[in-house]
Image (spheres, rainbow, N blue to C red):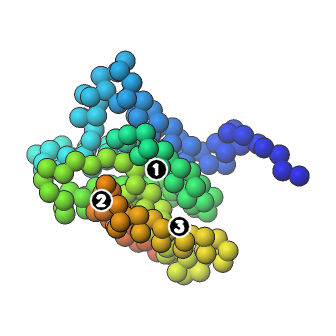
Amino acid sequence: MYRYRGFNSFFTTHPIVSILVGINILFFLLISLPIFPNRWIFERMVGVNILIANGEWWRLVTPIFLHSHFNHLLFNSLSLLIVGSLLEERVKRSTFVFVYLSSGIFANVITYIFASMTYIHAGASGAIFGILGVFATLTYFKKVHRQLSTSLVVIIILALLFTFTNTQVNIFSHIGGFIWGALCGYLIIRKRV
């Protein structure tokens, strides 16, 4: 018989994913609620390629935790809860943090290199696509259960279709995060991270 175990149980088994979702929600509240200097916070953290070119390198990291509207936050948080918790169950916590942050940073670097200098970007999708990239590699090398691999392939295909059919997404971030994640997946298999 199934018993609902609640948030405490999820937090206990998936603390990194829970903390990351909490950070995303916190920053969303900071930039949304009028009791904070929300415009100032957003302007100091959002990725703006021309400002990165002028030496504001922290903007390669901070956009990972910003979301421009509620639906953006909701979609990325749900994606992180679903695929992030699957990966957190299978790797060391330090490996998960490395994959998530390095995928997000690499995605922002790719955005900086390939998008225009006036391009503005925010969101955790590059980091989430990094997790999908890890699973693509693990699935390719048959390192996940067959039933799960089928579900993951469907999720990856849908995510890539969404990337190429929606004009509102940062395609550079999605592809960059996915490629970096695929490399991380290979390193995980080789026990290098």
The residue at the point 31 percent across, 54 percent down is 168
Q: Residue 132 at x, y = what percent?
A: 48, 65
Give the number of the mark in front: 3 or 2.
Answer: 2
- Determine the CA span between mark 3 and mark 1: 14 Å
- Mark 1 residue element: helix
Q: Residue 77 at x, y = what percent?
A: 50, 47
- Determine the CA span between mark 2 and mark 1: 17 Å
The reply to whether residue 136 is in sight is: yes
The crowding category of the residue bearing disc 3, from other C-alpha atoms within 10 Å (few below 14, some 14 to 19, many at least 20), is some
Q: Residue furthest top?
A: 35
- Mark 2 residue element: loop
In depth, the one of 171 and 66 nearer the eye is 171
In depth, the one of 176 and 187 nearer the eye is 176
Q: Residue 175 at x, y = what percent?
A: 34, 67
The reply to whether residue 185 is in sight is: no
Up the image or down, 66 lies above or below 91; here it is: above
Q: Residue 69 at x, y = what percent?
A: 38, 40
Q: Looking at numbered disc 3 in the image, what kind of residue is underneath it? A: Ile
Q: Looking at numbered disc 1 in the image, what kind of residue is underneath it? A: Asn
Residue denoted by label 3: 155
- Determine the CA span between mark 3 and mark 2: 19 Å
The residue at the point 43 percent across, 39 percent down is 70
Residue denoted by label 1: 76
Q: Looking at numbered disc 2 in the image, what kind of residue is underneath it? A: Thr
Specify whether 154 is left or right of 34.
Answer: right
